[in-house]
Image (cartoon, rainbow, N blue to C red):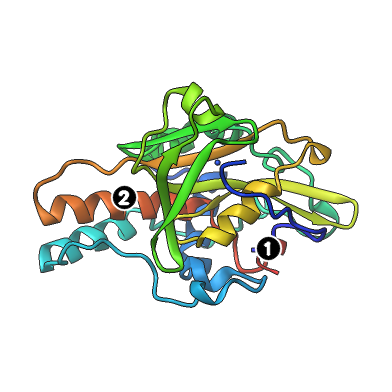
């Protein structure tokens, strides 16, 4: 993603039943299946060389039953007809307009969808188990470290007395899976929540730094995954598959300016 046309800050991270007429949610879900490749391939800016590495995966062995679990998670997003995501992702003269242009919170972002969408796809209107969202002013007071070279970051520490510590929600070891970022095109801009589960450290810094006052940002919105304590391999794989499947909802379609 190209977060900004203007210069990105270089501050450190510590300073986070189908109706006859398809609904908005149904249109969006099919487009996700059509346009969502791996997150790494969507980057249009030049990432660090460390980011040119295979996608972050669970460290536990993947059994045949685990593969079936992941397959079922993907199949849960299937819909019957070909729809458009134009109501959620705008381009051209429509860029920077509409109810989805500025992300403030998950509940607010999902509020334009109809009740029929909530009944048909309840899993998309609730954060997955062990996932939470937090809003913090800068400096965040979070020390991030990469999970592995060039892929994924987790909370290594919290700055004593910092905004994150005072919030009392974030814990060491939590994995960053989503972060808001600004993209400016001419005189227009948007703030979106981007899937960050495979972002490298520098990309996370760029995203956080783009949430500036001049774009109306009083905070940075982050989503974290606190890994469960499952003792079996299938449970760990299913948990990660659920998180990744959920975050695909926030991936822009192939024709979005966010991919340029």
Could you tell me residue 240's position as x and y percent?
A: 29, 53
Instruction: Report the residue that reaches farthest toward the right.
Output: 187
Task: Give the quadrant of the N terminus.
Answer: bottom right
Q: Nearer the viewer, residue 254 or 28?
A: 254
Residue 31 visible in the snapshot: yes
Q: Residue 184, relative to residue 2: is it above or below?
A: above
Q: Residue 227, relative to residue 10: is it above or below?
A: above
Q: Residue at x 83, y 39 (%)?
A: 214
Graded by Cα atoms within 10 Å as few (under 14), some (14 to 19) or many (20 or more), the crowding at tag 1 reads some
Mark 1 or 2 closer to N-term?
2
Q: How many marks?
A: 2
Which quarter of the figure has residue 77?
A: bottom left
Q: Residue at x 54, y 28 (%)?
A: 162
The secondary element bearing badge 2 is classed as: helix
Could you tell me residue 177's position as x and y percent?
A: 45, 49
Q: In the rendering, which numbered label is found on residue 242?
A: 2
Given contact means CB atoms under 8 Å apart, are the residues at marks 1 and 2 in contact?
A: no
Q: Residue at x 80, y 61 (%)?
A: 5
Could you tell me residue 215's position as x and y percent?
A: 80, 41
Q: Residue 5, relative to residue 231: is it above or below?
A: below
Q: In the rendering, which numbered label is found on residue 256?
A: 1
Give left or right: position of 84 versus 130.
right
Q: Residue 56, relative to residue 104: is it above or below?
A: below
The secondary element bearing badge 1 is classed as: loop
Instruction: Report the residue that reaches farthest toward the front.
Output: 160
Task: Give the quadrant of the C terminus.
Answer: bottom right
């Amino acid at each position: 993603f190209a977060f900004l046309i203007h210069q990105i800050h270089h501050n450190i991270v510590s300073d986070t039943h189908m109706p006859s007429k398809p609904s908005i949610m149904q249109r969006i879900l099919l487009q996700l299946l059509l346009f969502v490749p791996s997150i790494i391939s969507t980057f249009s800016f030049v990432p660090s060389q460390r980011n040119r590495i295979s996608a972050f995966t669970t460290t536990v062995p993947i059994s045949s039953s685990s593969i079936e679990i992941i397959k079922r998670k993907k199949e849960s997003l299937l819909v019957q007809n070909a729809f458009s995501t134009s109501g959620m992702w705008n381009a051209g003269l429509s860029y920077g307009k509409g109810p989805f242009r500025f992300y403030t919170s998950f509940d607010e972002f999902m509020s334009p969808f109809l009740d029929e969408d909530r009944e048909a796809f309840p899993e998309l209107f609730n954060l997955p188990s062990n996932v939470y969202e937090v809003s913090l002013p800068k400096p965040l007071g979070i020390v991030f470290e990469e999970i592995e070279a060039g892929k994924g970051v987790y909370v290594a520490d919290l700055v004593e007395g910092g905004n994150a510590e005072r919030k009392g929600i974030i814990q060491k070891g939590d994995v960053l899976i989503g972060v808001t970022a600004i993209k400016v095109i001419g005189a227009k801009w948007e703030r979106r929540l981007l899937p960050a589960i495979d972002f490298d450290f520098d990309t996370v810094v760029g995203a956080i730094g783009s949430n500036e006052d001049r774009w109306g940002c009083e905070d940075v919105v982050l989503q974290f995954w606190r890994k469960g304590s499952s003792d079996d391999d299938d449970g760990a794989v299913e948990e990660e598959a659920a998180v990744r499947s959920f975050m695909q909802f926030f991936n822009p379609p192939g024709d979005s300016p966010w991919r340029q």
